[in-house]
Amino acid sequence: MKKNIAKYIEQFEQTLNFSDLSWWIIDYKNDPGYFYCNKVMANTFNLDINAQKHSVVDTCPIAGDYIKNVHLASTNKANLIIKEYLELLNQEKKEYNNTFPYYDKNIDTVKYFSSKAKALELDEEGNVSILFGLIENITSKETLSKELKEYHNIIDTNVMTATTNTKGIILNCSSALCNITGYSKEELVGQKYNILKHPDTSEKVFEKMELALAKGEIWENEIKNQKKNGEEYWIKLIVSPIFNEQGKIKAFTTINQDITDKKIIEKLSKKDKLTNLYNRAKLDILLEKELQTFERYETNSSIIMLDIDYFKSINDNYGHLIGDKVLVQIASILRSNTRITDFVGRWGGEEFLIICPNSDIENTEKVASKLKDVLEFSDFGMKKNVTASFGISSYKENDTVDTLLQRADNALYNAKENGRNTVELIP
């Protein structure tokens, strides 16, 4: 049964005016240029609250003020709402549901509203005769949504994060992670997280991580990773489990902090720049640590001090560049012919020091003799052979680092006095 617009207005005032929703209605057949609305809408959009009806062109928040202030939003948005309004009139759609911004001149602020509309009645020819709509203030929701988008954009741009499933497959990642790794998001999503693992990083590190995560614990460590172009970088990796409603782990989130610069500084602080061996400062720390281990556990530990014979003549005859190459090659020989548990360093100039944990003086002497022979018969690209003199000492009761070093230095002095290219020891 058809109603006239007055009946609808009466019905809406009885049923809808208890809420903070704005409603409007248009007698499109008889009076299409005007709309009726409740007091909520009149107050919200600064309309004349005493007026019985309002001009669509002059006062409708969409058709009026919105278009006048369209610079506050995109023109396409305004056109879209008007297009959908016309589609509703032409019955190309039964209803529309859209959002629009509104500039409130009284408080100099842009507000946001959702707008819904539909045809309530058609005339005898099937044309729209009465239109009805609801408008809801969604400013708080829209503002929160914008703030969340901005927050997520800040996180995406500046924080290296990723989400993986329980099998380590990357489900999502931030732009910041893509930027440092050189991979696009499309290249990372769907891959196992270890696509970023550097070959030098032990699998045992990740085994420990998996054990911790399986217990629901948060795991963190410093990891060396590899970019798409093969370049290495260091991160502090924090991995946290994500639980479902049943308390079971459904995924993991990772936060990566770039600590490459920190690692470079650490390396520079403990490594000799030319040979990449431990420098003297680091050797001092290792000697003290080894002395503490000896005092606590009475383990056999020894040191080897060696000096390149007649190194000054190499620099004088071949130049300092060749001299540096000789030092680099010697460093490589020392690393290759000692145990992985030994600490090899450059003590200064052409002098080197090797700390041999859990090695008595007899075994350490064998190591020194081997190194002496390898050096003597190595090809350094010069007409002359390169040799070295060796002094050995072992930790003993009541030792200090200084007394240990002094005995090794005295043994080295004896080796030079005894013709060089030889090994001497002072227990």
Image: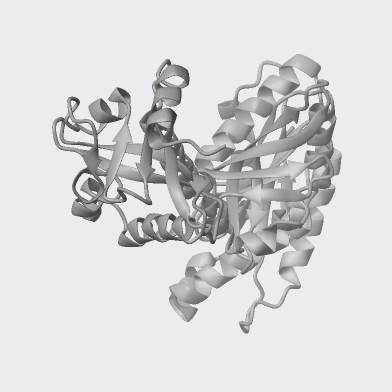
Q: Residue 237 in the image: x percent, y percent? A: 63, 39
Residue that appears at 69% across and 55% down: 196
Count how many numbered circles sit on residues in the image. 0
Residue toward you, 344 or 93: 93
Q: Can residue 305 be seen in this view?
A: no
Q: Is residue 59 visible?
A: yes
The vertical placement of 396 against 102, above or below, is above
Q: Residue 23 in the image: x percent, y percent? A: 39, 32
In the picture, measured across the screen, residue 120 lies left or right of residue 18, that is right
Name the image quarter holding the C terminus: top right
Q: Residue 96 in the image: x percent, y percent? A: 50, 49
Residue toward you, 202 or 152: 152
Residue that appears at 32% across and 26% down: 38
In the picture, measured across the screen, residue 285 lies left or right of residue 103, that is right
Residue that appears at 65% across and 70% down: 386
Name the image quarter holding the N terminus: top right
In the picture, measured across the screen, residue 277 lies left or right of residue 214, that is left
In the picture, measured across the screen, residue 202 lies left or right of residue 86, that is right
By what rule are the colours in the image chosen? Answer: one colour
Q: In which quarter of the image is residue 7?
A: top left
Q: Residue 291 in the image: x percent, y percent? A: 67, 24
Residue that appears at 23% across and 49% down: 64
Residue toward you, 301 or 342: 342
